[in-house]
Image: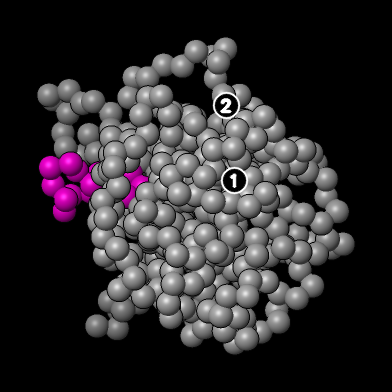
């Protein structure tokens, strides 16, 4: 695999001393399953809602552990509504996510299922009315969308856990998406011309969070500046993204992880215009490479988890391991802004996110070849 890139000198690291170690109460009851929240919205989250960073309480003053738990409380039931765990069954007539077809790619042995969910203006209006519950306080721009609504698309693919062509191993998925998400996305996505990590919170002191019956830990939180090249005559799009990752641990063993992790991404719409001193300092030290681009937005939730297949008493350990399946889910809503109407964007979005599966699996094969060639050359020199 390619090695991690060196972090830019302009990057700000949050002060770990500002983290208050508080354990939030258990959340996400059956009554709250599918309930929308004000944070994971297309309109994004503003700088004054972010946890403190270096140099004081700004840009926001909320507790870091509480903030991470709040994101999880919204993300877990929302992504769970696409593909429930266990034997849960859904009434197809009441299903929130509507099937939108299946796509196949030569780089992937697994098909890619597509779904869509339209969140109406009425649902978001309810969120706006309830947004102050639990200490949240958003302005009138905090929850919005085209015509007051949001269109979400989701893809689901299930891959064999193997370091082989047309698929990838659990270790590869985890390394690329949990540990090196930004770097990996830039390398396998042709349209990404910039992916800079500019602010990183130190989450080492955040205790495990009990959300929806699972214990989450190993948090990361950062702000990324991503630039996508769309092609003429359209201008490039720049996304200021707040991104969180976390994984699950066993309830009775805080050192043993379960094979599941999440990535949550949100736009910070006022990132380039905020008067917060920390952000101004960063912008002063940055070049003007993003001038002339259009500031765009998206929100996404990505879930990776291993789906073990029951084995018989005669199944060998190697055979059982090879039967393990990895579920890759991604739900996304976006607005490229500019002159493109949202309805046109929404038509193209399912195909765009489905293509990411083939792009990654095609890229990872080349990375394995690079690694193997490098090791072979070193062996010959010895």
Residue 67 visible in the shown view: yes
Query: Could you say whether the residue bearing mark 1 is in a helix, strand or loop?
Result: loop
In the image, what residue occupies the spot 67% across and 29% down? 122
Does dot 2 land on a helix, a strand or a loop? loop
Q: Is 259 covered by the magenta stretch?
A: yes
Q: What residue do we see at 36% from left, 75% from top?
A: 15
User: In which quadrant of the rendered view does residue 283 lie?
Assistant: bottom right
Q: Quadrant of the N terminus?
A: bottom left
The quarter of the displayed image where residue 227 is located: bottom right
> Which residue has dot 2 on it?
97
Magenta stretch: helix, strand or loop mostly: strand
Dot label at residue 41: 1
- The spot of residue 159 in percent (x, y) is 42, 39
Numbered range of the magenta stretch? 247-261
Q: Quadrant of the C terminus?
A: bottom left
Question: Compared with residue 26, is residue 92 higher up or lower down, i.e. above or below?
Answer: above
Q: Position of residue 22 (x, y in %)?
A: 27, 55
Using the image as rendered, state which of residue 272 and residue 7 is in the foreground. 272
Residue at image location 63% in from the left, 71% down from the top: 274
Calculate the distance from the C-alpha at mark 2 to the C-alpha at mark 1. Answer: 17 Å
């Amino acid at each position: 695999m390619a090695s991690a890139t060196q972090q830019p000198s302009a990057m700000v690291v949050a002060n770990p001393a500002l983290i208050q170690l508080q354990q939030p109460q258990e959340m996400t009851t059956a009554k709250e399953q599918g309930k929308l929240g004000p944070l994971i919205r297309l309109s994004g989250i503003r700088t004054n809602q972010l946890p403190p960073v270096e140099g004081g309480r700004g840009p926001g003053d909320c507790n870091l552990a509480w903030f991470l738990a709040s994101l999880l409380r919204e993300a877990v039931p929302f992504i769970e509504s696409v593909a429930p765990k266990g034997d849960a069954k859904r009434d197809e007539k009441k299903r929130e996510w509507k099937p939108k077809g299946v796509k196949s790619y030569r780089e992937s042995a697994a098909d890619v299922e597509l779904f869509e969910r339209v969140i109406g203006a009425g649902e978001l209006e309810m969120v706006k009315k309830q947004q102050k519950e639990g200490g949240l306080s958003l302005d009138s721009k905090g929850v919005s969308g085209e015509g007051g609504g949001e269109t979400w698309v989701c893809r689901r693919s299930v891959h064999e856990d193997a370091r082989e062509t047309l698929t990838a191993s659990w270790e590869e998925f985890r390394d690329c998406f949990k540990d090196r998400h930004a770097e990996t996305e830039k390398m396998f996505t042709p349209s990404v011309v910039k992916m800079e990590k500019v602010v990183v919170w130190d989450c080492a002191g955040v205790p495990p969070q009990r959300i929806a019956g699972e214990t989450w830990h190993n948090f990361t939180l950062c702000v990324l500046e991503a630039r996508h090249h769309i092609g003429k005559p359209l201008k490039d799009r720049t996304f200021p993204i707040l991104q969180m990752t976390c994984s699950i641990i066993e309830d009775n063993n805080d050192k043993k992880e379960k094979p599941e992790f999440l990535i949550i991404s949100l736009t910070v719409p006022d990132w380039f215009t905020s008067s917060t001193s920390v952000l101004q300092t960063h912008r002063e030290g940055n070049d003007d490479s993003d001038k002339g681009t259009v500031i765009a937005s998206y929100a996404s939730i990505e879930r990776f988890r291993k789906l073990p297949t029951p084995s018989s008493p005669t199944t060998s350990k190697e055979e059982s391991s090879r039967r393990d399946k990895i579920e890759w889910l991604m739900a996304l809503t976006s607005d490229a802004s500019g002159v493109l109407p949202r309805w046109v964007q929404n038509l193209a979005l399912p195909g765009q996110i489905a293509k990411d599966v083939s792009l990654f699996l095609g890229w990872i094969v080349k990375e394995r070849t690079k690694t193997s060639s490098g090791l072979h050359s070193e062996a010959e020199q010895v």
